[in-house]
Amino acid sequence: MKVGDVAEIPLPDGRFAYGRIYRDASIGIYHEVSEKPGQPPIGSREFLFTVGVYTDVLDDWRIVGRDPFKSADSEWPPPMVVKDVITGIPKIYHKGEIKDATSEECKGLEEAAVWDSHHIIDRIVKELSEESLSN
């Protein structure tokens, strides 16, 4: 599995979600899902979320395409927030580095964590469900 590969993620309702592989053991989950397998939204830049993922999880999912990045810099996932477990002070994690940040700078950022496949699938289902309820 390489950066830019697109993995197909079978959902419990029979649909398929897709994830674009980033550097730093991360995956961006495309907003679009399909009813049939093998229909990744190559070229779309609308993502439900981007999270860290255990590398062995990627072995469970089939690679169904490539969605190359425009530059080496764009291969990195978006910045994420890391909170000190003792002080609760937030920091920003980006491109393998942690830097000091204000709470305001961290607002709206994904919390840095490494997710397993069932957690990713549960979140996809939840976000799609919430979206359909709001429409």
Image (cartoon, rainbow, N blue to C red):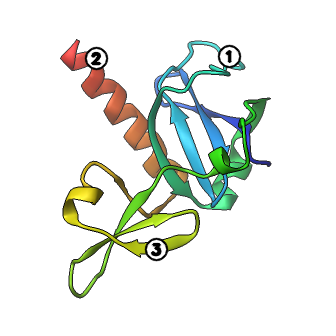
Q: Which residue is mark 3?
A: 98
Quadrant assignment, res 96: bottom right
**Marks 2 and 3: CB-CB under 8 Å?**
no
Q: CA distance from mark 2 to mark 1?
A: 21 Å
Q: Which residue is mark 2?
A: 132
Residue 65 rendering spot, x and y as whole percentages: 77, 28
Q: Amino acid at mark 1?
A: Gln
Residue 8 rendering spot, x and y as whole percentages: 66, 32
**Marks 1 and 3: CB-CB under 8 Å?**
no
Quadrant assignment, res 43: top right
Q: Residue at x 58, y 21 (%)?
A: 44
Q: CA distance from mark 2 to mark 3?
A: 36 Å
Q: CA distance from mark 1 to mark 3?
A: 36 Å
Q: Is residue 6 left or right of residue 10?
A: right
Q: Is residue 39 left or right of residue 15?
A: right
Q: Amino acid at mark 2?
A: Ser
Q: Which residue is mark 1?
A: 39
**Marks 2 and 1: CB-CB under 8 Å?**
no
**Few, some or many C-alpha atoms within 10 Å of disc 2 (few <14, some 14-19, many ≥20)?**
few
Q: Residue at x 49, y 51 (%)?
A: 51
Q: Circle 2 — which element?
A: helix
Q: Is residue 88 above or below residue 61?
A: below
In this orientation, which residue lies closer to the viewer: 73 or 67? 73
Quadrant assignment, res 104: bottom left
Q: Is residue 111 left or right of residue 105?
A: right
